[in-house]
Image (cartoon, rainbow, N blue to C red):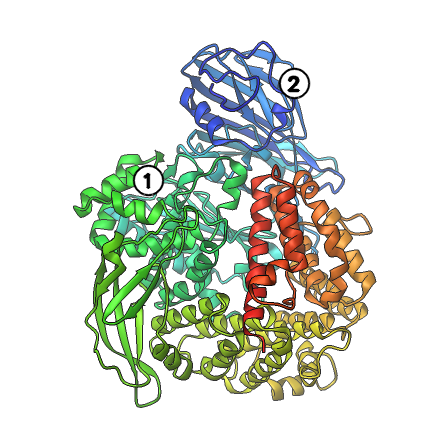
Amino acid sequence: MVINNTPGVSSSPGAPLPAGGLPEGYLDRTNLTRDEAFARSAVLATRDYEVHLDLSTALDPQSSSYRSRTTLRFSCAQPGSWTFLDFINDGVESVVLNGQTLDPGRVAGGARILLEDLAAENEVTVTGTAQYSTSGEGLHRFVDPSDGQTYLYTQYEPADARRVFATFEQPDLKGRFTFHLTGPADWVLASNQAPAARRAAGTDGAGRDLVTVDFATTQPMSTYITTLLAGPYAQWQDRWAGHPASGAPEVPLALYCRASMADSLDAERIFTTTKAGLDFFHEQFGTPYLWGKYDQAFVPEYNLGAMENPGLVTFTEQYIFTSTATQAQYEARATTLLHEMAHMWFGDLVTMRWWDDLWLKESFADFMGTLAVAETTEFTGSWTTFANRRKGWAYLQDQYPTTHPIVADIRDLEAARQNFDGITYAKGASVLKQLVAYVGRDAFMAAAREYFVRHAWSNASLDDFLAVLSAASGRDLRDWADDWLQTSGVPELWVEDGALCQAGIDPTSGEEVLRPHVLKVGVYSPDDVGRLARVRSVEVEVASGAEGARTPVAIPAALRAGDLVLPNDEDLTYAKIRLDEASLQAVLRYPVADGLAGATVWAALWNMTRDALLPAGQFVEAVCRLSGALSDAGLYGSVIEQARTAVDRYAPASERNTLRGRLGEVLVDSLHSRGAGSDRQRSAARTFTRLARGAADGGADGHPTLLPFLPVLRTLTGVGPEAARDQARLAPGLDVDAEIRWLAWQGLAALGRATTAELDATLAQDVSATHAVWHRMACAALPDPAVRNEAWEAVMSGGTADGRILSNDHLSAVAAGFTASRPDLAEPFTERFWPALEGLWASRSNGLASRTIEGLFPSRQDAITGTAAEQREHPVVVAAQSWLDGTPGAPRALRRIIVEQTDDLLRSLTAQATHRS
């Protein structure tokens, strides 16, 4: 095996182990490098895995681990060479290679197991123990506070299967998996494939009956998409009829969630979306779904939105709506359901070789999921949501100093974890939307069908996809790929003197990049009811390179007052748009009638606010005057949240509370005027409660402009003999349910208008996992120095004062509470933050460390005296830069978090300083 850049280890494939042995600590390394992975797959080919997990200890609160046994068969092209297995373990009992028992004390570390003197065909069996997780990585164990039931599920991407069983943990070493799972007899035990057998397995330590379920063997797949589910899950079943034209057979469907949430799961609606998605993807791709069943499980304390495990897709249980949900929430769930379904082809059937090509699955799933929602569900405006929300994420990520090409340079697993970001998902999907406009939808889908035929059950790269797409479209796409996929940064488009102009700099190289675009330029004029309506749309094809700097466009030379010229009409390409002064004044005066065009305009205004080109006060005022006329309720909810952020982050301190009062008045009015029980009314209630927390910026007593609104928060808690009457007067028709009540309590807590006793009493009335997290956040937000110190210690230590471990969601809740109220109480902890960073990263999983560092970063700051440029001298910016300068050897993933958090802070300080009076 080739191990490059490893001192003391031969870099020749097939070489024997060096006489000096492996470097110290080599078998404890968790950060697999790309070089190591490629060297391993160059000489190895996996055949199959047989994995036995014994979860008989899962119900014992004193037990933190479980037994794991893996038998793996693989071939080696260089007999006599060596390699290693990945297994982050709690102890290795035995290792048997080709019938020979190895000494675990010599070959097994905390993360790797050395295999020497390999044969052409090999079989290794590893028996050991692994830890139950509370971080959402590996095998997560959760105890439901509402009924005491225990639930388990796995989450592996990018590389946490090795926390559960011994693997070759890289996507290009696919194998067939046969899982055997032992657990309580009355539990659901599930995996990627259906059970093949079920047999008695004795009893656990408390005398409960156990069973072992043997699952059918999978198709060839990567380790990161294997999965297991165990616990007393509620379940529902249905069937999809199949798709004869593509040869797809009938598929059994199932849904799972915790028993205490079963009454809230709308199974019929989810099954309807699932069937529509399977119909759509078979019509588009022509390649049948061959993973057997299609289960979907909604699980607690999930770090992601969802994970595309074939046969058993897992989702955050936040998609089970225990409180009233808006259409935007239902749309978001449908988009996630179909995003994951698209992965059954893009990612599962055909998988990237390494994480450099992560976009080959995530960008495609993001694009195809949105397309499927638009064309198969009631959410026909899903591209409007994409334009405002997903692309907003991309624009933000692509302007960080850490930006990277869509096809990124991923040198190791820590870098891979960080690249599940707005570039890989949303920018990639935006560029694919532009690609479809560029080559045509028919050619794109034909290429996808050929891609699946050529590379089914194997791995592929960017070159493989470009080959089939070039053939299908008749275009040589190598230059297009270089311009869009191999460069970084956001293009800018604007119309000037009869031409569409483009500018673009790749921030990673400093070079100019002018990309090709196929797009439309729209002209909008005020109509009879005072809305900007489209009166003309012009198609434009922009060349790459210098020729693409100015492209003639046929728009009227003489525009009327109030007209809007909108580059990127219909949002076909990926670019920030600059509005000319007349167009800017038009959109600040009139609402835009078309939903997608409106989303494009509001995205431009938000980018201008973040770039300090538009004062936060002007953005907030525009939201106050125009948001009520938005045709899309989801866009309304997004825009008023952006206004809240503008108040909290981008407004100068001298204006902040006045703007907060202005926005607060508009939101309270919206509780009356946006329609009884409407989505807009609910969005206004949510944003108001979050906006109110910021009044703590004014110190112990808040700011007088918000004091009149404190009774609104108290009314929304539902406390008091006249609560129902007061709520009906305040917000007729609003469902003041647990979500709204807890948001109100969190606002009151941050303002010092709630007590721990009140918060505890509210939780006691209705105990659930979600309510417990909301309660923890509210308690940590109380503006008391002792509470602040306790919250700090809990997040930094990972546990509470009474010794309880904070799981992932609870740790984030405490961190959110710590930063939710008076910044003056958090300020003394800032100097303690920087020295702790490397220790936190080394002592915790990447997931928990990231939550801790991002949660406690001192981001709520006011601009210092001086110009915008002088904000680099702000004490927190200086401290962050000093840490970066002083720790060049810190892990790259950790440094990336600090760089991005610092950039966010500097952007907010710059906006404040630029526009203060």
Is 441 situated left or right of 149 in this image? left
Query: What's the residue type where badge 1 is placed?
Result: Leu
Query: Which callout, 2 or 1, points to the residue nearer the camera?
Result: 1
Q: Position of residue 59 (x, y in %)?
A: 70, 42
- Above or below, 810 relative to 862: above
Q: Which residue corresponds to the image point at 43% horizontal and 55% vertical from the top-left?
A: 337
Q: Name the residue carrying label 1.
A: 462
Tally of numbered discs: 2
- Estimate the x, y position of residue 727 in percent, counting from the top left: 64, 84
- In the foreground, 458 or 619: 619
Mark 2 vs 1: CB contact within 8 A: no
Of 211 and 898, nearer the camera is 898
User: In x, y percent, where is residue 876?
Assistant: 66, 57
Left-right relation of 563 to 189:
left
Residue 104 is tagged as: 2
- The percent position of residue 744, horizontal first and vertical second, equals 67, 74
Q: Residue furthest left?
A: 474
